[in-house]
Amino acid sequence: RAPAHALVPLPAGLDLADAALVEPASVAWHSCHVGGVGPDTRVAVVGAGAIGILAAASAQSMGATDVTVEARHPHQHALRERLGAGIPTRRELMMRDRRAASYVLADMAGDAAGLLDHLEIEAAHVVGASMGGMIAQMLAAEHPDQVRSLVSIMSTTGSRWKGQPKFSMYR
């Protein structure tokens, strides 16, 4: 159960379905803000889940003139079309400049360490899945005093060259 001091009462008349969008919408808006989205910027959103669709809408409302969304499922394609967002080409997805990322794994690990500090948790057993596993590994590497144990599930080091199986494994 969450402590009472961490809860925010909903305004009268706010539908629960709308209230449930506050957190993912704020994540999407913040990511566009931190990424410097504004007029005349190009934005490619990879993944059309709730946060991805909200990120595309946020980018458009911030003035981005060229927004594309990579979607997997038919209902995601329909939402992408309703937004008027394009479909990124395979070349655009593969050739994106990864150096342009302004919020990297180390930043996310730092946020996790800051959250532990704020919650007055001296050290924690950390479990991360997929990208969360990469963040957990970074947290353990950069803040080892805050990690009692680490479980990294379905994850990688984040390096294209380290921690990968040899090509002979794919035969």
Image (spheres, helix red, strand yellow):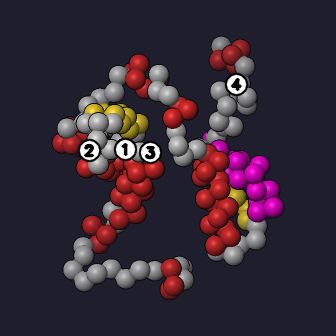
Q: Which of marks 2 and 4 is nearer the N terminus?
A: 2
Give the residue at mark 4. 161
Give the residue at mark 3. 35
**Counting other residues with Cα less than 10 Å from the Cα at mark 2, is it few (<14), some (14-19), or many (20 or more)?**
some
Which numbered circle lies on residue 63?
2
Amino acid type, residue under disc 2 in the picture: Gly
Task: Please report the bounds of the magenta region as a residue range.
Answer: 133-154
Q: Position of residue 39 (x, y in %)?
A: 28, 41
Q: In which quarter of the image is residue 65?
A: top left
Amino acid type, residue under disc 1 in the picture: Val
Tell me the distance, in whole angstroms, between the alpha carbons under discs 3 and 4.
Answer: 27 Å
Residue drawn 61% across and 45% down?
Answer: 105
Q: Earlier in the sequence, mark 3 or mark 4?
A: 3
Query: In screen coordinates, is 69 left or right of 31?
Result: left
Tell me the distance, in whole angstroms, between the alpha carbons under discs 2 and 4.
Answer: 38 Å
The answer to whether any part of residue 149 appears in the image is no
Where 14 falls versus 62 (above or below)?
below
Residue drawn 58% across and 44% down?
Answer: 104
Tell me the distance, in whole angstroms, between the alpha carbons under discs 2 and 1.
Answer: 8 Å
Please report contact status of discs 1 and 4: CB closer than 8 Å, yes or no: no
